[in-house]
Amino acid sequence: MRVTQFLLWSLFLRILPAWGMDYFDYQATTPCDPQVVEAMAPYWTQEFGNPHSPHAFGVRAATALEAARQQIAKIMGGKAQDYIFTSGATEANGLAILGVMGAASPKKRHIITCATEHKSVLETCLSLARQGYTVTVLPVDRKGHLSLELLKQSIRADTCLVSLMTANNEIGLIHPIAEILKICHDRGVWLHTDATQAVGFLPPRAFRADLVSFSGHKIYGPKGVGVLYVAPHIKIRPLIYGGVQEQGKRPGTPPVPLCVGMAKALVLAEEHREQEKRRLAQLQELFLGELRALSGWQLNGGRKDRLPNNINVSIEGVDREDLLAALPEFALSSGSACNTEEHFSHVLEALDPEEKNPPAALRIGFGRGTTEEAVRRLVSQIITAVQQLRVAKPSGGKRACATQKGTLRSSRKS
Ligand SMILES: Cc1ncc(COP(=O)(O)O)c(C=O)c1O
């Protein structure tokens, strides 16, 4: 029954573009699965109790909340009480970093992170630096890999926490979290990983750490809910103060419908993980193969150690706004949704800090609604748009790759 529902919905998502745009921004967010909506439904209306109320309404809400926590723990590992519901991965990352650093001994005021982390990690670390903590931001190579040697060398006597994401939201690069955890533990340091983009694609053992964050709306769950796993040996200080909810670590009335939806989304994501991974990896191959008909582009990040649902390409000789405007039938992004107000993606900048005039970049995210036909249509229209723009605006516009550092590698070499 479940499988039939999933297939029907996937089919619906795949015929949906006939009425509008083809959605290629699954790293920004995903639609809520109807089975998730169905699971949440009673908790908005008849089962609306506050889980901390003593009466029957409260007891039923508390039962649903704890069942959701149990489901999450069963999939992710550890005990239900190790999981704290938050408003999303941004808050979960903030609670992990500020919470651990705030509870640590005054002798442990050093934190290590990486230049390609999500802004919710980088900005949180920056706020710590402003308070007098020491922050080391590790660089990455041209493909987005960090050096484990450099990580080892960067750990000092006063290091408290390392925060490194499992998979990158812009270039899909996967960090070897199991190896990193060993490095950290061998040196008496805790590891936090932001697994927001990895959940549903990697097995939970791939992001086992002392603290793990993830979000509902990246896995076909609701927006406004996230989870932070805190291992029993880790002490955290809350970011806000109030009641005893979430063991006092995240006070405030828990949004029961969202928590129920989050657990349901995770169950479904795990059920379909391998099958979806294989399907999306084929679409990734198809996209890259078809794009070979175009010259002057490169894949940002490597092909190895990459999420199957992500592609990020830089295209020489066109302006990124012109390019997006020339592709009105596709919901695409030129980077992370959190970076759209900015000039240029900090992730792409980290891959090539010397580049002063970066080429247009497109992030293409595949998901449950993506079909082979839509991928072919997208590639074909990218090629047409780029060729037309290169003729119409030979200078490539203000953010074009004016080849200050020489031309990009051709597609065949990438
Ligand atoms: C890697 C990563 N971390 C954190 C977040 C923030 O998640 P949320 O929207 O749930 O706050 C995102 C969302 O873009 C993300 O991709």
Image (cartoon, grey):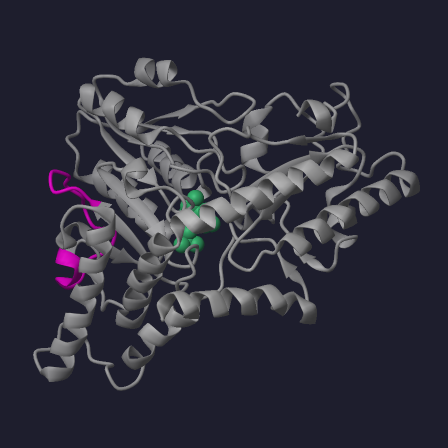
Q: In which quarter of the image is the C terminus?
A: top right
Can residue 110 be seen here? The reply is no
On the image, which quarter does residue 325 sit in? bottom right
Residue 242 on the magenta span = yes
Horizontal and vertical percent position of residue 366: 56, 50
Horizontal and vertical percent position of residue 289: 68, 36
Closest to the observer, 65 or 106: 65
Residue at screen point 36% across, 13% down: 149
On the image, which quarter does residue 226 sit in? bottom left
Horizontal and vertical percent position of residue 322: 79, 48
Give the residues in magenta.
230-247
Q: Is residue 349 left or right of residue 193?
A: right
Horizontal and vertical percent position of residue 383: 79, 43
Our reading of the magenta stretch's main secondary structure is: loop
Can residue 303 be seen here? The reply is yes
Closest to the observer, 211 or 287: 287
Closest to the observer, 192 or 299: 299
User: Is 14 above or below relative to 333?
Assistant: below
Q: Is residue 328 left or right of residue 368?
A: right
User: Is 8 above or below relative to 269?
Assistant: below
Residue at screen point 29% across, 29% down: 178
Residue at screen point 45% across, 42% down: 119
Closest to the observer, 207 or 10: 10
User: Is 166 above or below relative to 38?
Assistant: above
Residue 11 on the magenta span = no
Q: Residue furthest bottom?
A: 46
